Image: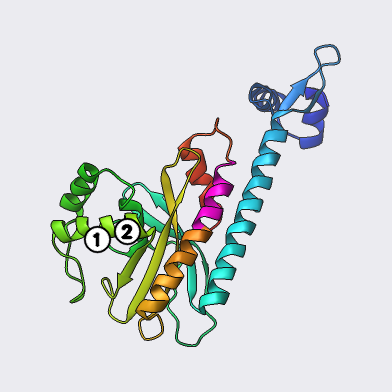
Amino acid sequence: MTIAEVTEATGWHKSSVHKILVTLHHHGLLDRNETTKQYSLGIALVGYGQFVMNNLNIRHQVHSLLNELSDYSGETANFSILNGKYIVVIQSVESKDNLRVTPPIGTMDPLTRKSNGKAVLASLPEEQVVNIIQQEKLPAFTKNSITTQKAFLKELEVIRKQGYATDYEEFQEGIHAVSAPVSNADGKVIGTVSIVGPASRMTKDKMHLYGNLCAKKALRITDIFRLWPISQSEADLTDHLKGAI
């Protein structure tokens, strides 16, 4: 369509239409035939379409893996992503049991609080972890809370060796959780896969079983994110993952 045709079809002022078309052309969303002066859909739309398809694919695959974790354990399975100094729950499959633990989508916690945060911290240099601890402190939420820097750093060593983090009623009484780290194409931890449930059901034996299972699912999600285009920035990837909310 020409500028005149778009103006007639929309009823907008010609100068406004011209500015919009020029802007869309600049970003590749429209192409302009210099001979006929007609505008048509641009090649950049292919990229946007692929982005949407990838987003739908990631959401589907992550949700499918969470379903597998929840079905196997009978507990709630979560997927969280790193957002600055916080870990945020962006996708969840609830336990079907009447007595269940379900952190709401959007739940945001400092990295020092729960198993998902500890799974991220275990991947960071000790100097950076110490800095985070000094900022966030280590308050006692329950009698099981880790409240000293020395004990916390020792806990991170255990997490590195076993490949997953645990929470034995450290943040809230009556709740156990396990989390495994998910990495991007550069090997940087960007999120976690978790199973959370009542302490009465999630015994220590089950915790280790679920931890290893989370680690396997986390590797599968990591493989998905390794396909993320190298040209895309980390900020793009974070926004992309938030599309799962």
Task: Give the magenta-colored segment's residue range.
Answer: 218-227
Tell which residue pokes out farthest to the top in this image.
35
| Image point (26%, 55%), residue name | 157
Q: In the visual, does 214 lie left or right of 48?
A: left
SS assignment for the magenta stretch, majority: helix
Q: Does the segment drawn in magenta span residue 212?
A: no
Q: What residue type is labelled 1?
A: Glu
Residue that label 2 marks: 159
The quadrant holding residue 196 is: bottom left
Does residue 4 lie above or below 135 as drawn?
A: above
- Is 172 or 72 nearer to us in this picture? 72
Query: Residue 165's x, y, as percent?
Result: 35, 62
Does residue 38 lie above or below 73 as drawn?
A: above
Q: Which amino acid does label 2 sit on?
A: Ile
Which part of the image, by quadrant, shows the N terminus? top right
- In the picture, the disc for residue 189 is none
At mark 2, the secondary structure is: helix
Query: Residue 149's x, y, as percent?
Result: 15, 56
- Is 35 or 10 nearer to us in this picture? 35
Query: Residue 209's x, y, as percent?
Result: 44, 72
| Image point (50%, 57%), residue name | 218
Residue that label 1 marks: 155
- Is 106 or 101 nearer to us in this picture? 101
At mark 1, the secondary structure is: helix
The quadrant holding residue 42 is: top right
| Image point (62%, 64%), residue name | 64
Tell which residue pokes out farthest to the right in this image.
36
Query: Residue 118's x, y, as percent?
Result: 31, 58
Give me the C-alpha separation between circle 2 and circle 1: 6 Å
Does residue 150 lie above or below 169 as drawn?
A: above
Asked if residue 57 can be seen in this view, the reply is yes
* Disc 2 to disc 1: CB gap under 8 Å: yes
